[in-house]
Amino acid sequence: MDTIKIENKYQLLTYEKFPFVINKGKGCYVWDENGNKYLDFYGGHAVALVGHCHPAVVKAVTKQLKELIFYSNVVYNSQRALAAKSLIDLTKGKFASVFFCNSGTEANETALKLAKKFTQKDEIISFIGSFHGRTIASLSITGFEKYHKGVGSLMPNVKFAQLGNIESVKKLITNNTAVVILEPIQSIAGINEAPSNFYIQLKQLCEEKGIVLIFDEVQTGLGRTGKMFYGEHYKITPDIITLAKGIAGGLPAGAVLVSKKILTSVKLNDQGSTFGGGPVICAAIVATIETIKQKQLVNNAYKMAQILINKITKLPHVIKVHGKGMLLGIELDIPSKQVQTILLKEKIITGTSSNIQVLRIMPPLIITKKETLLFIKKLSLVLKNL
Ligand code: PLP
C-alpha cells in the first residue's frame, strides 16, 4: 500500500509532513514501514511524555477497553474519579477541581469561559509569540498574525503584551480586564522564556488587579520542564492551568485545573464535553500519572536536561540552548531546518520552530542517559561537518 500517496489524496492537506510512514513505536523509538529505527527527540509533537506505547498505559487501556469503552458525564465512573483525584493530588492542594476535555484548544477555551464568568469581565491579555490552539477563541489569543489571516472575525477584546516585559502588560490593563493567559515557555515561537522575575511580577499584578491568571501548560505540564507544573520553578500558582498533549500517554485528552477561588463561580451546565473524561482516556491518565511518579520522570527530565544543555552549548554553530527539562530550543547560527534534515538521515527526529534558527527537542521524559548521549554524539557530528 502506498500510504503517502493515499494519505496525501484523502487527508485534507493542512500539514507539512516528514517523508516517511511511522507505524510502530516503543519507548523513545519509532520505526518506519521499512523497519528503520528512529530516536524520537520530537516526541510525536511533545505528546510522548512517557514514551511510545508505555506498557503501563497499554495495560490500563486494554483492561478498560474490555470493561467499558464509553459512557458520558451523565453517570459516575471509577476511572474518571481516579483520574480527577490523581491530577488534583499532583497540585498538593493548590487546585480543587478538574474539567476533562479532549484537546489543548478545548482546555484553553474552557479556561477563558470560566475566567470570564468568574470576573464578569471581558478583556483578555495574551502574549506575542504564544500558541494556544486553532479553534476560534484559542486562535484569537494566539500571538501570531500569520495564523489569523483569512479567517474573518476573531474573538474581540484580545490584546497582546510582550513576554518578559511587565510594563507592556500593565499598559494593557483596564477595568474590564478578565484574564491574562500565558504559555510559560513559548514553544512554537522558538522556546522563548522570560526572566524569572517576570513570572513572579505577573502573578503579583494579576492578584492585585483581580485578574484571572491562566497558565497554558499544554506543553510544559506534568513534568516536562523538570517540575510537575511550570509555576513550581518560581513558587507561584496561577488560578487555572490547562493541560493536554501527553497527559493520557498518547490518547487524546485535555484537562483544566481550577483553583478553589474560581470554583466559587462555577454552576451546573457552565461547561460540558461528550467525550471529555471517558473511561478509557481516564484509565490512560491514571496510568500516565502513576508512571511519572513511580519512575521519578520529573527528576529524570531535569537531570537529562542538564547533560544536554552542558554538552550542546559547547558544540559548533550553537549560540545558546533555551528552555527547561525536556523542552529545549537549540539556537544555531545556521538554519535549523538544515540540521533537522541531516539528523533525520541519521535516524533522529527533531523539530523546528517559527524562529528559523531554533531546533526544538521534546523527547519523552523516560529518556535514558545512553539515549541522551547518543543524541549529543550525532548532533555533534552533524554540526562539526557544517
Ligand atoms: N497550547 C499549546 C501551548 C500548544 O502547544 C498546543 C498545541 O500544540 C495547544 C495549546 C493546542 O493543543 P491541541 O492541538 O491539542 O488543540
Image (cartoon, rainbow, N blue to C red):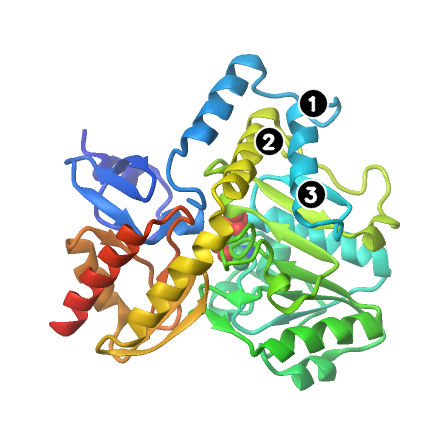
Q: CA–CA distance between discs 1 and 3? A: 18 Å
Contact check, label 1 and label 2, Cβ < 8 Å = yes
Residue extending farthest left: 385
Q: Is residue 364 visible?
A: yes
Contact check, label 2 and label 3, Cβ < 8 Å = no
Of helix, strand and loop, which one carries label 3? helix
* Residue 291 to residue 155: above or below: above
- Residue 282, by quadrant, is top right
Q: CA–CA distance between discs 2 and 3? A: 15 Å
For the image, the number of numbered tags is: 3
Residue under the image location 59 percent in, 16 percent down = 68
**29 on left or right of 142:** left
Q: Earlier in the sequence, mark 2 or mark 3?
A: 3
Q: Residues within 10 Å of mark 1 (few under 14, many from 20)?
A: some
Q: Mark 1 — residue?
A: 77
Q: Position of residue 259 (x, y in %)?
A: 78, 52
* Residue 97 to residue 173: above or below: above
Q: Amino acid at mark 3?
A: Asp
**124 on left or right of 262:** left
Front residue of 360 and 93: 93
Q: Mark 2 — residue?
A: 282
Q: Is mark 3 within 8 Å of ligand 1?
A: no
Q: Amino acid at mark 1?
A: Asn
Residue under the image location 42 percent in, 44 percent down = 48
- Residue 137, by quadrant, is bottom right
**134 on left or right of 241:** left
- Residue 333, by quadrant, is bottom left
Q: Position of residue 71 (x, y in %)?
A: 65, 21
